[in-house]
Amino acid sequence: MKKVLGKIRIIFIVVICILLLIIAVSFINHRIQLKKESAILSPIGTMVNVNNHQMHVYTEGSGAKTLVFMSGGGTSSPVLDFKGLYSKLSNQYRIVVVEKAGYGYSETAAVSRDIDTILEETRTALSLAGEQAPYILYPHSMSGIEALYWAQKYPEEVTAIMGLDPAIPAAYEKFPLPSDFTMGITSFAARIGITRFFPSIVNSSAAIEENHLSEQEKNIYRAIFYEKTQTSNMNEEVKMIVNNAQKVSEGGIPNVPMYFFISNGKEVPLDDWKNLLMEYVGAAQDGKYMILDSGHYIHDYEPEIIVEESVKFIESI
């Protein structure tokens, strides 16, 4: 019995040592790669100081109407993720992409992710970058909650909401959110560079697969992904989303024109995702929707249709 226990102990120690070695090698390689990749990670927009942390605001085009693109939760590089859509609109409108704390070129910061703080930081970043309301909001996924709250709190600043498979408050009443433990493990793996051993994760992202980016931009996208996957700000957003959604739910449906582009729902872990969005926008005073047979990153899969419908809708309001 003692011999068996001794062998088990040795095996256990060997396994632990191997795991520690893998972690050490991964971390060292990750730090080396991050240093190399920093050479291609110069912000392409304007950096502004908001709440003592730097936020990145990218602008393009010079039209009279300003479209503000708001990324979904966990989208590492909003500026590049939205490029397939905004690049087709910037010849007619001014487009702006605000990268929240912990996203893209923006700093990861120790700031609350309650809905009021998130919204005020977005508004402040826009103002400091020289942008002026009113805006036409293009929220993707989780940012749908922020966009709706914006229209509730500052209706004079929101001309319309063009939802890109946007989340609405009722979705988070039963949305299967990851546990703190799961997010902690994922964050730890990202911080030590484990994600680099699985390049298929980033290469399967819609922005890369749909070929909206140049080869250089794809390399930048990958570099940002390895640096900004499951950041602390992203985790805090998930932890706060139920409370944030509840607050928006209590404010009712804002009285602004809305056009929701809704995916087929297959990439969203909620069976009635489509119906919830259709019911919500259908109850709006000036609401419209279109169902597209595509995945959740609908702006990457169907930019041409969204552009065509956007122009018609925007010019009609």
Image (tube, rainbow, N blue to C red):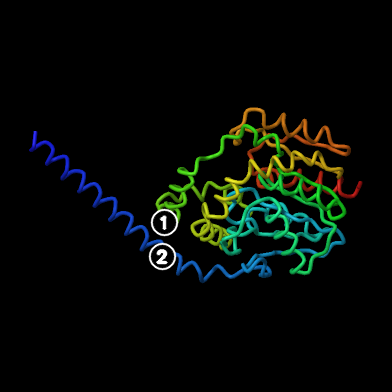
Kindly identify the residue that appears in the image at 69 percent across and 48 percent down: 143
Query: Percent position (x, y) of residue 234?
Result: 57, 52
What is the C-alpha distance between the residues marked 2 and 1?
Answer: 8 Å
Q: Which residue is mark 1?
A: 193
The residue lying furthest to the right in this view is 316
State whether residue 146 is above or below residue 62: above
Give the camera-side residue of 249 and 176: 249
State whether residue 247 is above or below residue 36: above
Q: Quadrant of residue 288?
A: top right
Kindly identify the residue that appears in the image at 71 percent across and 36 percent down: 292
Label 2: how many Cα within 10 Å (few below 14, some 14–19, many 20+) = some
Left or right: where 107 falls relative to 21: right
Task: Identify the mark nearer the N-term, 2 or 1.
Answer: 2
Q: Which residue is mark 2?
A: 31
Left or right: where 180 falls relative to 308: left
State whether residue 87 is above or below residue 275: below
Query: Percent position (x, y) of residue 123?
Result: 75, 60
Q: Residue type at mark 2?
A: Arg
Q: Residue type at mark 1?
A: Gly
The local secondary structure at tag 1 comes to loop
Query: Percent position (x, y) of residue 165?
Result: 70, 41
State whether residue 208 is above or below residue 266: below
Give the camera-side residue of 210 and 255: 255
Label 1: how many Cα within 10 Å (few below 14, some 14–19, many 20+) = many
Kindly identify the residue that appears in the image at 33 percent across and 55 percent down: 23
Kindly identify the residue that appears in the image at 53 percent across and 55 percent down: 232
The local secondary structure at tag 2 comes to helix
Q: Are marks 2 and 1 in contact (CB under 8 Å)?
A: yes
Query: Percent position (x, y) of residue 134?
Result: 85, 57
Q: Quadrant of the N terminus?
A: top left
